[in-house]
Every structure is written in structure tokens, then in C-alpha cells.
Amino acid sequence: MPPASRDPWLDNVKMVLVTLVVVGHAIGLVEESAGSHWVYDFIYLWHIPAFVFVSGYLSKSFEWDRRRMKSLVYTLAIPYLLFEPALFYYRREVVGEDVTGPLWIQPHWTMWYLIVLLMWRLVTPVLKRHWLFLPLSVIVSLLGGLWTDDSLMIPRFLGLLPFFVLGLHLKPRHLAHLDDVWVKVAAVPMLVGIGVMAVYTDTWAETALLWYDTGYSDLPIDNEIAFQTRLTVMMVGLVGAFAAMSLVPRRSLGWFTTMGTATMVVYLFHGFVIKTFKALGWPDFTASYPAMGLVLTVLGAVGLAFLLASPPVRRVLEPFTNPLGWVESRRKRPSSAPTSV
């Protein structure tokens, strides 16, 4: 069970969101299946904003002190330096994908979040000083679409900034309102409405806008409309994020809540499994059986997230997500152990 000091609701939310990360990435294996684009767009309209918001909310205590800077290096910088080349070469040498670009400078596939979160954390002490940084971050996000260089994923750093800053400034008493009955009742039609919007994503927006990394110049719409559309996408993402989070139970759900403390394991390792299924020919199977392929892929992605977060697998993989911290904990353990009599 997670420590009593942890908020079980946050662990539940984290597990739901990281599971959707796996599902979203797995959908890439079934692009030819009917309905896959709708599922993808529905998830991406709000789950990345929700993930970023939670990251901001959990970053409130970050300061430029030695302990927190060390933690930042151990939990984000080192995993990025290790897993970025690991995933790159696995995709290129084992899966046979034509991936290019300089390592670490241009994050590959899932690794973008580590470097972007690290940069958000570094500016957290400034961003949390005043609520005026929230409207300013919206302006920064809108202007971020003019940035076309994806080095260090600066476009996503700028584009998703409002959700991170909002997380920094909202307090537990604010999030407590998500437990209000009227909020939960309204959440269902809100998500249904977003589901309908997802059917027509390419009519009122572009799927590329949901990634927050595509420059306006690369979209088949004028800059003026692109500004308005990004703002609309942000608003939909915010509504969807809070609607979904309001439906997540507040109480501890036992094993599910415990798995919510292992989201980094899920995030860092799920890409290798998904790419392995690609190398084994899963997209060919789903092309032959599109409906069944989509259902099995979604169910398999959920199962993969649960498997990676399960205590037995987590114990094996977690040292790789924070190797220096693991080594330090092993060194301290003998000296802190009680002397047997």
C-alpha cells in the first residue's frame, strides 16, 4: 500500500493517465483500423493536458536547492540520458524503423516528456511566484506555434505550459470541488461532447495541434485561425482533463492505487514492448482483422500498463529508472539496519 501521506486520488489519476499514454501509443499499431483515429483523437484531446497539469501540481515544492536539484538529476536527467539512446537504437536496429536526428537534442518518440518536464521544473520557482504567470503562459503557448525548431521539444515546452502553470497554482481546496456532485454529473456529457468533437477533429482543427509540437507554418490553415484553433484545443483539453479527473475515485483502490506510484516504470518501458509488437507484425494482423485488432490492441495496452506497474515487475525494473538513487539506497541500507542481538 502507498504511504499514508500520499493522496490516493492523485495515484489513481496518475495510473489512469499513464495507462492512456500506453493506449495512445499502441493505437499507432492499428492506424488502418476503423475507429482508431477517433479513439486516438479523443484521448489526445485531453489526456496530455491532464498529465501535464498533474505534473505541475506535484511540482509545487520544487526549489533551487541542492536536495531537489539532485533529485531532478537522478529522476529525470539520468533516465533521459539513458533511455533516449536505448529506445532510439532499439527502434532502429531491432524494429528496423528509419529514425534519425541527433540524440538528446531532438528527443525521440516518448522521451520528449522527460526533457520537457525537467525544463518546466527548472523554471518552477519563478512560475509559482504569482498567478499572473498563468495568463502569460497562455500567451506564450499561442505564440509557441510560431516556433518551428523541435530541438529539446521547445514547441511542447511552450505549448503545454499553461497546464503546468495551472497545476502549480491550484491548491487542494480547489481540486476538492471536483468531488462535487454537480461536477461529476456534468463530466459525463462533457466527455461525450468531446467524443463527438473527436469524430470531426480534422473539420474544426487538425490532429497535429493535439500534439502541441507542430508549427503553424506546417498546418494547412492561416496563422490567425491557427491561434484561435489552438486556444480552442486548449480549452477543450482543460475541460476534458478536469471532467475525467472528477470521475476518478478519491479513495484508495488497493492494488490499483499502489500501481499509481510506478508510473515512471510504465512510461519508460512501454515503448519497447509496443515496438516489439510492431517488429513481430502486429500491424499486419490488425489490417486483416481491423475491428478485432483495435479491441485487442486497446485491451493489450491496458494490460501492459498494469503489468509494468505490478509490484513484481516494478521491483525488477525500478532500479533502471533511477540507477543512482538505487545504488545510494543500497549503500545506506546496511548501515541503517538494526544490529541483531
Image (spheres, rainbow, N blue to C red):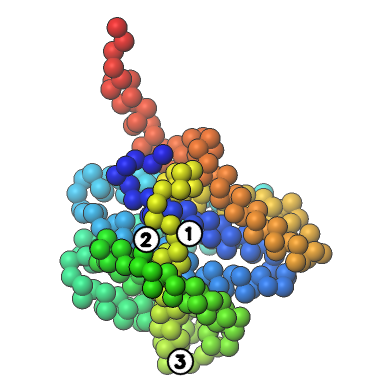
User: The disc labelled 2 sits on which kind of residue?
Assistant: Val
Q: Residue at x 19, y 49 (%)?
A: 65
Q: Quadrant of residue 22?
A: bottom right
Q: Nearer the viewer, residue 32 or 175?
A: 175
Asked which secondary structure carries label 1, the reply is helix
Mark 1 surroundings within 10 Å by alpha-carbon count, few (fewer than 14), some (14 through 19), many (20 or more): many
Residue 232 in the image: above or below residue 87 = below
Q: Residue at x 49, y 57 (%)?
A: 16
| Tags 3 and 1 touching, CB below 8 Å | no
Residue behind mark 1? 17
Image quadrant containing the N terminus: top left
User: The disc labelled 3 sits on which kind of residue?
Assistant: Ile
Residue that protrudes farthest toward the left in the picture: 129
Residue that protrudes farthest toward the top in the picture: 341
- Left or right: 303 in relation to 327: right
Frontmost of labels 3 and 2 is 2
| Tags 2 and 1 touching, CB below 8 Å | yes
Give the spatial CA distance, label 2 vs label 1. 10 Å
Q: Nearer the viewer, residue 133 or 175?
A: 175
Give the spatial CA distance, label 3 vs label 1. 30 Å
Residue behind mark 3? 225
Q: Nearer the viewer, residue 111 or 36?
A: 36
Can the viewer see residue 97?
no
Image quadrant containing the C terminus: top left
The location of residue 86, given as percent across then percent down, is: 54, 48
Give the spatial CA distance, label 3 vs label 2. 29 Å
Total count of labels? 3
User: The disc labelled 1 sits on which kind of residue?
Assistant: Leu
- Looking at the rendered structure, which numbered label has been put on residue 54? 2
Residue 63 in the image: above or below residue 242 = above
